[in-house]
Amino acid sequence: MYKCEGSLLLDPPVSSISLGLIRGLLYSDLIRRTLSFFFSNAARVGAITYVSGGVVFVGKVFITTTTTGGAYFLMEGLRQQLYSMIGPLFFIAFIAWFIAGMFMSVFDMAIATILQCFVADEEMFSSDEMYAEGTLKSWVDDHGSK
């Protein structure tokens, strides 16, 4: 456990920094409260992180196949000038996979930020004073701990 705490003290994760900015904490309190926050909400954070990982993977596959399919139809007219379309299509798919990963990582960070803000909002305020809307609250309650 010491190694985990030591690494968090030297290089805290981005999620703990965003949580500290939400609450306006000092650095030492930031690490302590971040660990407490994630351990007390481990089921919710874990379940939605797992689902968001699947969404990110499906998004990367969709973007890659759409890009490669579009390139295939654009290169159809060049078929007589090429020996094979396999090489250029693999190259396009390779590049598209990494570009899709960059775009989907932004989407994944947005999902994580919204989840953390929701859980922090839920901890800091009563259900009447929460900033989160009812639809988000009901969705997280229904799907967050299964």
Image (cartoon, grey):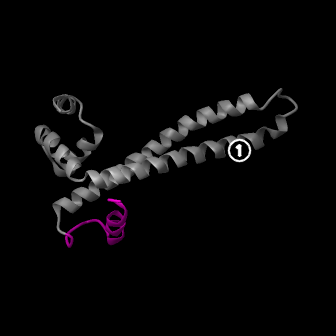
Q: In the image, what residue occupies the spot 29% across and 65% down?
A: 132
Q: In the image, what residue occupies the spot 24% across and 53% down?
A: 41
Tell me the residue that label 1 is attached to.
70
Q: Is residue 56 left or right of residue 35?
A: right
The image position of residue 69, as x and y in percent, is 70, 44
Q: Is residue 143 left or right of residue 131?
A: right
Q: Which residues are magenta?
A: 127-146
| Quadrant including the C terminus | bottom left
The image position of residue 23, as x and y in percent, is 17, 51
Q: Residue furthest front?
A: 146
Up-down relation of residue 142 to residue 107 (above or below): below
Q: Is residue 121 part of the magenta span, yes or no?
A: no
Up-down relation of residue 112 to residue 27 (above or below): below
- Disc 1 marks a residue whose amino acid type is Gly
Q: Is residue 60 left or right of residue 126?
A: right
Query: Tag 1's secondary structure?
Result: helix
Q: In the image, what residue occupies the spot 14% across and 45% down?
A: 25
Q: Is residue 140 part of the magenta span, yes or no?
A: yes
